[in-house]
Amino acid sequence: MTVSSPISPVFDVYAIRQAFPILGRMVKDKPLVYLDNAATSQKPLAVIEAISDYYSGYNANIHRGIHTLAEEATGAYEATRHAVKQFIGAASGEQIIFTRGTTEGINLVAYCWGRQNIRAGDQIIISGMEHHSNIVPWQILCEQKNALLKVIPVTEDGELSLTAYQNLLTDQTKLVSIVQVSNALGTVNPVKEMIAAAHQAGALVLVDGAQSAVHLDIDVQDLDCDFFAFSGHKVYGPTGVGVLYGKRALLEDMPVFQGGGEMIKEVTFEHTTYNELPYKYEAGTPNIADTIALKAALDFVNATGKADIRKHEAELLAYATEHLENIPGLTVVGNAKQKAGLVSFVIKGTHPQDIGILLDNLGIAVRTGHHCCQPLMKRFNLPGTVRASFAMYNTKQEVDKLIAGLHKIIKMLL
Amino acid sequence: MITDNNQCMQASEKEIIEDFSLFDSWEDKYEYIIDLGKKLPALDEKYKLEENQIKGCQSAVWLVAEYRDGRVFFKADSDAVIVKGLVSMLIRVLSGHSPDEIINAKLGFIGEIGMRTHLAQTRSNGLLAMIRQMKNYALVYKTIRTKKTQ
């Protein structure tokens, strides 16, 4: 059996670009080069139209109405749940809870599962490369419960020290919450192995899939993770909709998140019984339009082909890394063996912010700063980095523009 | 005297606007700002304290103020050179003026030289926070002075 998959002849980046209206615009009189995809990806026309179709064609509140519009809206909303279930390999749609995004998903677990299950002296493990949204909710929980937050150290190459991880796992460990792909370094963490180790120690695992969902094939059952959170807007979908997956038994046992409509079965002034999964966690009128449009985004990714996209992005990453490393004074931050979607770097004698400001004048959008990973930047003793992150629609020509832009800018700055 | 100073603040702004009118490309503008940043004397390390650091900037920016003979004098530094260049212009315009003049300064030159984008209220940008902090210093000195004369 061979592991290599042939490149699909249908993957045509220039045809793909046509589907994204924003890519045609100019910035500072130059064609936009959008390399800030790890912050948010651009949206294909199908997603933009799905939002507009909903509002102009069948806007209605979902689940309770018995009229035609309500039925259509409910059908479309639940169709997204089904599409997400397929997208991440969940066993059932009831395990797919719609949130505002990854951050809300993590906070939901910290609030609902954490408050019920974490006790004084318990330990929660995160890693040194976590986004603030996978640090702060656990800090709040640990402070409330007198529990301990432990941190897996990051190596010089930007990988997690798995030996240190093994040593941190004890019978006090109740939860491990780790990022699958680092938003600051691009490191792909071996979460499957880490999940197995955590389970052996009797701990649960939450996987922060904010970056990974768009780049990797996700199979939550194969990973055997207990929770998986990701955001719609990083997978070419709208902002304001995200997903929390959980194992059924956990979701059934956990107390509710917010109280209100939709999440109840029966309310009296004395007592309320709660709705079944997944509605028990979806109080109030949800973000219907954006949730419906998320399906259009996932359909678009599936139709383009995730394997082809991954191959294309890996080529861009390798090409960019090779050419960046040839720039005198430039250091790539994060040299993990497995990387996906982005490259972070610093240039000797320059500040990332200066690079970002000058690149913007060339119409090139990159991210500069600490990437919401201040502890990680501290680890590398850096004020921040410049990050170029890729999507299915980026081209080698755009990478060339970045490289040429950097050469020009360095001359201006040094 | 206050009128004189006010005119001098406007004159500094005018000079900057005139300097920038010579540039017709963004490269020239930024090279000039970068040059200003490089020429601004580094702040003594003893002032680079957290209490002097302006929060909310992607780059580190330190600002110190001194009140002498009814005027506020500023010194500043940054680890990012473009910010330092912008700061250098702010110092040129604002430093050495009375608290009232600083508080009321419109700083129209920033827009005139095409640097308004640097005032955008994003997390990454410190210029707005910098101006606010300079005006805060002026306000504090004004309050102290008013209390003393009461």
Image: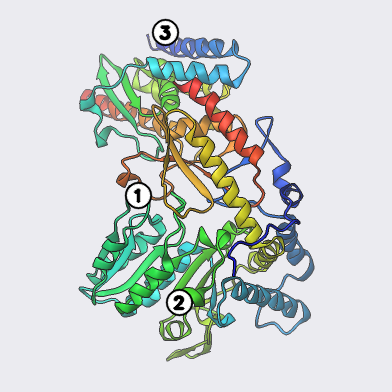
Query: Residue beneath label 1, please?
Result: A376
Q: Quadrant of residue A241?
A: bottom right
Q: Report the residue at 36% width, 29% height from top.
A: B79
What amino acid is at disc 1? Leu
Q: Quadrant of residue A112?
A: bottom left
Q: Taking A159 as reference, is A360 left or right?
A: right
Q: Quadrant of residue A199?
A: bottom left
Query: Residue beneath label 3, please?
Result: B4
- Circle 3 marks a residue in which chain? B
Q: In this rendering, does residue B119 appear at all?
A: no
**Looking at the picture, how far across and down is residue A201, in whole percent?**
29, 77
What amino acid is at disc 2? Asp
| Same chain letter for marks 2 and 1 | yes
Q: Is residue A163 above or below residue A391?
A: below
Q: Residues under labels 2 and 3: Cα distance?
A: 74 Å
**Looking at the picture, how far across and down is residue A173, in whole percent?**
27, 73
Q: Which is in the foreground here, disc 1 or disc 3?
A: 1
